[in-house]
Image (tube, grey):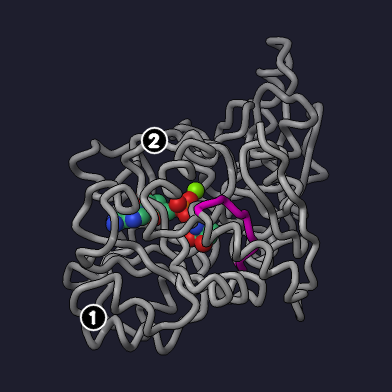
């Protein structure tokens, strides 16, 4: 066990002494959790293989699931990648800093452990003052997966980070809850047309407008489990985003969904389970369960995305055995929400029909 230092920092103007302290830890091969606009990340010097190895150990992350490398300036990517296509340049100019991760061919200087032996590398520039200050002050490229124990919902507050990693990491920079709440979109630029491997903070519809051709890989839609060979994205065979409780997702037309959620809640309660229902403002009044929570209004998918991981963690704190979750529209940020929910359920998806 180590002592994890908690450094509260100002979101707008991060205090330079605290940022320097954290940057020194990174430079010396240590681990610092930090906020981004999406979720909190757990950072290590991406070019220091030992530091990256301790990062995998702290998270108990399987060694075949590579982290995203975070940069503080777009030009930093040229050390990490081979050729950068005009299409990729256009995306970087348009969306960086922001919640878009691009997959490139990697360069020789990137240690194998950082990319789990792949010949590609995932890179993004986060849109967050604290993250950018830390990266720039350290002078490093920072490998940073989400700062949760492997398999758990991603952290959107420093409290979530400490719940999973207190005593396992050197420090956390705490600048309050993150703005977007789901992770970045992962876009593979090594294929033509580019493919979305994970939907996230930059919606598919927005990328389509800029790129014309862009494909949604089936793994991004996550309607069912794919074989590892078909999945193409590493690490997909592992459990993701899962609270301790079992999750069941109910999909279909809204009134049918409400009826099915009611029926399932009753079924599990009769069996003696402690039941949680993950609802929305429009439907929350319909349910009788041990714990019912609303993600927000169905008309505001950004709020729903922002609340998702926090509520999954809250259900665990309330000790529910099973969470029955409503579907939300799979458009805009809703596609990222549905991807996380489907994966959290281990693809236990019930289709409600009105007939
Ligand atoms: O918003 C985010 O992206 C957050 C914050 C901290 O920046 N980070 C994050 O990292 O979500 P992580 O490690 O939890 O997710 C990284 C994703 C995984 O789905 C991984 O499989 C994929 O990126 N990935 C990484 N390198 C890849 C590569 N070379 N090819 C394909 N997918 C890759
Ligand atoms: Mg993660």
How far across and down, in percent of the image, does residue 39 sit? 61, 58
Secondary structure category for the residue under label 1: loop
Q: Is residue 247 above or below residue 223?
A: above
Q: Is residue 225 left or right of residue 118?
A: right
Q: Nearer the viewer, residue 8 or 204?
A: 8
Observer able to see residue 231? yes
Task: Please report the bounds of the magenta region as a residue range.
Answer: 29-37
List the residue tagged with mark 2.
62
Observer able to see residue 308? no
Marks 1,2: beta carbons within 8 A: no
Q: Residue at x 31, y 40 (%)?
A: 64
Q: Is residue 326 above or below residue 346?
A: below
List the residue tagged with mark 1.
84
Quarter where residue 223 is shown: top left
* N-terminal-most mark, 1 or 2: 2
The reply to whether the magenta stretch includes residue 6 is: no
């Amino acid at each position: 066990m180590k002592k994890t230092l908690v450094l509260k920092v100002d979101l707008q103007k991060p205090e330079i002494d605290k940022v320097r302290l954290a940057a020194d830890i990174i430079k010396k091969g240590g681990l610092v959790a930090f906020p981004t606009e999406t979720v909190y990340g757990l950072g290590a010097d991406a070019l220091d293989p030992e530091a990256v190895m301790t990062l995998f150990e702290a998270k108990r992350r399987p060694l075949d699931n590579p982290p995203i490398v975070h940069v503080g300036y777009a030009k930093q990517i040229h050390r990490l990648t081979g050729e950068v296509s005009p299409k990729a340049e256009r995306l970087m100019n348009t969306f960086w800093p922001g919640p878009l991760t691009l997959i490139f061919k990697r360069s020789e200087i990137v240690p194998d452990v950082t990319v789990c032996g792949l010949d590609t590398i995932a890179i993004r520039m986060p849109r967050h003052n604290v993250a950018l200050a830390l990266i720039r002050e350290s002078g490093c490229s920072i490998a940073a997966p989400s700062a949760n124990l492997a398999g758990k919902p991603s952290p959107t507050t420093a409290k979530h980070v400490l719940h999973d990693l207190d005593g396992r990491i050197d420090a956390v920079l705490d600048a309050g809850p993150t703005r977007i709440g789901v992770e970045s979109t992962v876009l593979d630029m090594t294929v033509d047309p580019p493919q979305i491997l994970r939907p996230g903070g930059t919606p598919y519809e927005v990328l389509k407008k800029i790129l014309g051709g862009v494909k949604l890989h089936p793994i991004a839609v996550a309607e069912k489990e794919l074989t590892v060979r078909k999945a193409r994205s590493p690490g997909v065979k592992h459990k993701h985003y899962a609270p301790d409780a079992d999750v069941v997702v109910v999909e279909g037309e809204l009134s049918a969904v409400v009826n099915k959620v009611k029926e399932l809640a009753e079924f599990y309660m009769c069996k003696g389970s402690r039941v949680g229902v993950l609802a929305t403002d429009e439907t929350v009044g319909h349910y009788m369960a041990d714990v019912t929570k609303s993600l927000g209004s169905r008309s505001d998918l950004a709020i729903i995305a922002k609340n998702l991981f926090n509520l999954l963690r809250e259900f665990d704190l309330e000790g529910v055995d099973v969470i029955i979750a409503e579907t939300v529209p799979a458009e805009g940020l809703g596609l990222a929400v549905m991807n996380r929910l489907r994966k959290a359920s281990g693809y236990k998806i019930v289709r409600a029909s009105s007939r």
